[in-house]
Amino acid sequence: MIDFSSFMTEVLQLLILLLAAPAFTGWVKTVKCRMQGRTYAGIFQPYRDIAKLFSKEVILAENASWIFRFTPYIVFGVTVLIGGIIPLVSIDLPLADTADVIALVMLFAIIRFFTALAGMDIGTAFGGMGSSREMTISSLAEPAMLMALFTASLGANSTSLTHMVQVMAHGQFILRPSLAFALLSYIMVHLTETGRIPVDNPATHLELTMIHEAMILEYSGRHLALIEWAGMMKLFIYSALGIAIFCPWGIAATDDPSGMLLGGVFLTCKLAAGGVILVLIETGLAKVRLFRLTEYLGSAFLFATLGMLSFFILE
Amino acid sequence: MILLVLLGISLFFAVVLAFVGDWRYAPEINIAGSAATFSAGVVLALHVYLYGPMMVGHKFFFVDAFNVYLAVLTSFVSMTTAIFSRRYMRVERAHGRVGRWKMRFYHAMYQLFIFAMLLALLTNNFGVLWISMELATLSTVLLVSLYRTPTAIEAAWKYFILCGVGIAQALFGTVLLYFAAERVLGVGGEALLWTNLSQVSNQLEPTVLRLAFVFLMVGYGTKVGLVPLHNWLPDAHSEGPTPISAVLSGLLLNVALYALVRCKVLVDGSTGSHTAGRMLMGFGLLSILVAAFSLLRQKDIKRMFSYSSIENMGVATFAFGIGGPIATFGALLHMLVHSLTKSAIFFTAGHASQMHGTQEMDKIRGLISGNPVVGWAFIFGAIALVGMPPFGLFASEFLILTATIKDAPLLTPLLLLGLGVAFAAIFRKVQPMVAGAVPPWQTPLKAAHVPVLLHMALVLILGLYMPRFLSDWFHMAVGILK
Amino acid sequence: MTPSYAAQINSVMAALILLTAFGLLIQRRILGLLHLFAWQGFFLSVSTAIVGYVTGVHHLFISSFLTLTLKVILLPYILYVLMRKLNIKREIESLVNIPATMLIGIALVIFSYHLTSPITHLSTLVTRSTLAVALATVMLGLLMMVTRSHAVTQIIGFLAMENGLFFAATSATYGMPMVVELGVALDLLIAAFIFGIFFFHISTTFDSLDVAQMAKLKEED
């Protein structure tokens, strides 16, 4: 039986996800603008963007099928579902027992599947190109992600996220090279999946360089608002997942309000730092050529495998 | 004391020749240095023969019958090669193939190479053995590329890389050996000494030593020229000045085989079985067969004789692998006579190629008519090399064959096949070179008579009659290698 | 520092050495290769120093210092000067494509783990688990030499192999006796000079440092 307080914790975390994700994206954009010496529109600009999109009219192509119309809702819904599994401020989550990190990757795959189908649905050149590129990249990125998560789970002997957080945060502190390798690999996959430089430029609409943007090029109005919001939540989720696995100190073990408040403060600080690191990586690196992406993702897989091997060899 | 003198002489002369190597009398200084080294070696050998094995310098050096005989052989052949080098390099200088700086470098590195080989032979410490093997390689790498032609540089690069890689594996094997030794003998330099290790060899961990031997086999086996690690050998021994080819083929291969055999004794003592010996037999036989069949395709004279070196080293390795008194005696004798014969052959082949301006066998003709000493020495050298009686190689190969029939009868046909094919291949090529009329492009030169005749005489004597002290020496060495 | 902490830090250093070994395998730019090689030497000397501190084997400090001067400072500097003089700055293509090379590298790591497991079980040292990493570094250096066709990268692969060997000596046996280590360092220095000279010869004779064109010596049929 789910008791009331953990149910409230769950709802609270979902709310945090929904409401804080655009702020995180705003924070990343702000820091980037500061780094590049441009004026910035403020942390709350994404909220205004989403609100603006909701008020606009939806234009559908004539040959759009039900997939095209359903995808935004599916994407949004699944992203919220994923958010229910990740411990943000507390590990007392009833939904967490339903899915472990492996299932998490599968949920992301569902999102990707529908987005790619929607990109091809209308039949434009950009959409098809974006979908094919996305599928190529994901076929390389998913093994790397799985291997990285698997390596991280070796220490805790379980793939359940809450269990991993518990072992790491409340156990003994040991320097583990396997985790370092897994972290490196995870960062590389994070950049890939959320469509940041060096894999995909989130600010571009040039044909040669866009991947994610190409798939959603045809969307407008509330559909686009939902997809954009889901994209921001995806960035938030990936960052929060990384923090939960590799840097979980501060996440409350119970559901008492003071612990969760402290957890919230920690989360904000960690996310802020994570945003700055993300911007540093983005400004420091250049976008990798599409054909070199196999090497990039191959090395992500390599690092994750090395992490796994070093767990067995060195620990 | 005498040992330090022995090593010190070559080092001293190396330094001296670095400065005076291009004088008119530099080759004579080289000869003097090598002769002094040889006499010191003989004194050392007498000492060991009369008084038994000795340890010098706080257990750092160890001289017993096995390595002192190789040390005497090394210093002897280096002396005769220095005599040969005098006439040979004079012609090369006249042809303009080497200049002032190169002569200095050549002479200095020659002596350094001798030093490195002697150090490898006489040291008691496996680590220092490795270091001196590496030093020997390094000192000859740039000598192989002395002529700076594209093929010479290619040969030297291959030599450097392949031998470097090989010897790095040998270092790993040495580390593993040290690991096993440490557990029994304690930490510190004592654990790498041959004298200590040979006494406790049955206490060393068999699994570790087996693994170590694989690496040591790959490492030192590359330097011996065992197939399939032999790719550098034909190139390195055929490019570069002929005296260097002679000492590389005649001496360095022996030293590498010595290192390998010392390791084999330890490993077989530890595991109690014959795994190391069997591995040596396998690789030796493979080398014989591959080299023999490769001999059929050769067009370059020095390359052909390099393959013959691989084949003969394969025979010696095979014999050491069989083990037992007869085979080991045969192997020791084989190392001796092969050294003498191969260097003699290289002397004559070097002069032959100088006379014709090329190393291609199709262009070399009429040696006997052109220069009788070179021609007759060449044909007799070839007869000796392929193992015909009454020369020494026949005696050693016969002994090895006897041991094979006794201990590994099923391998005898393969051994005979290899030896037979090598016989045919070499003879087929040598015969046209010595016979016939003098071709118009042959230039006369003053050849070095003494080294060749001396070597051939020794090989003939050893084939007919084994001096008492030599057979005693060999019996002592066999006792060590059991 | 308690032994278990030292063992952990040593494991981290071992992991970093393995990382740089793989980095050497997949890096295309020669300057990047030099930096990675210098980092590898640095991690190696730190690891040696830690082992020396914890176990009280004092000659390891000397070895660590030797490694630092030779492999972190001197050799990369020599290579850098050579590259400037010979004007090599471009990228180098490898013979086998990079993802395949990485997979072979992983296979080699697993193989070396399997090969050294009997020794790891026998050893009683603090550093015993890093022997597999050391052998893997040797093999990865070998792989690098085989799959690249440029003279400089072959030499760097060779030096990476030597790094692995040195690491193996520290992991298996707390370092070889001082005499041996000094001799090995001396050999390495001589080898460095020799290959420096070699680069000049190759470059002047062949007008490039591509090793693939040095393949003329073989049997003609």
Image: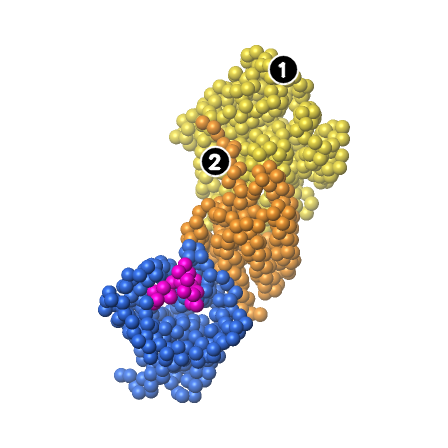
Chain colours: A blue, B yellow, C orange
Question: Which span of residues is magenta-colored?
Answer: A199-217
Position in image of residue A267 (x %, y %): 45, 79
Residue under label 2, please give it: B227
Residue under label 1, please give it: B371
Kindly report the secondary structure that dominates the magenta region of the rendered protein: loop
Q: Name the residue rendered at 40%, 80% in the picture.
A: A48
Q: Name the residue rendered at 28%, 61% in the picture.
A: A123
Say which label, 2 or 1, has the lower sequence index.
2
Give A261 or B183, whichever is nearer the viewer. Answer: A261
Position in image of residue B438 (x %, y %): 59, 13
Q: Mark 1 Cα within 10 Å, few/some/many (few <14, many 20+)?
A: many
Observer-side mark, 2 or 1, equals: 1
Whole-angstrom CA distance, mark 2 to mark 1, is 36 Å
Same chain letter for marks 2 and 1 = yes
Give the structural element (helix, strand or loop) at label 2.
loop
User: Tag on residue B156?
Assistant: none
Asked if disc 2 and disc 1 are in contact, CB closer than 8 Å, the reply is no
Q: Mark 2 Cα within 10 Å, few/some/many (few <14, many 20+)?
A: many
Give the structural element (helix, strand or loop) at label 1.
loop
Q: Name the residue rendered at 27%, 63% in the picture.
A: A121
Q: Quadrant of the N terminus of chain B?
A: top right
Res. B436 in view:
yes
The type of residue carrying mark 1 is Asn
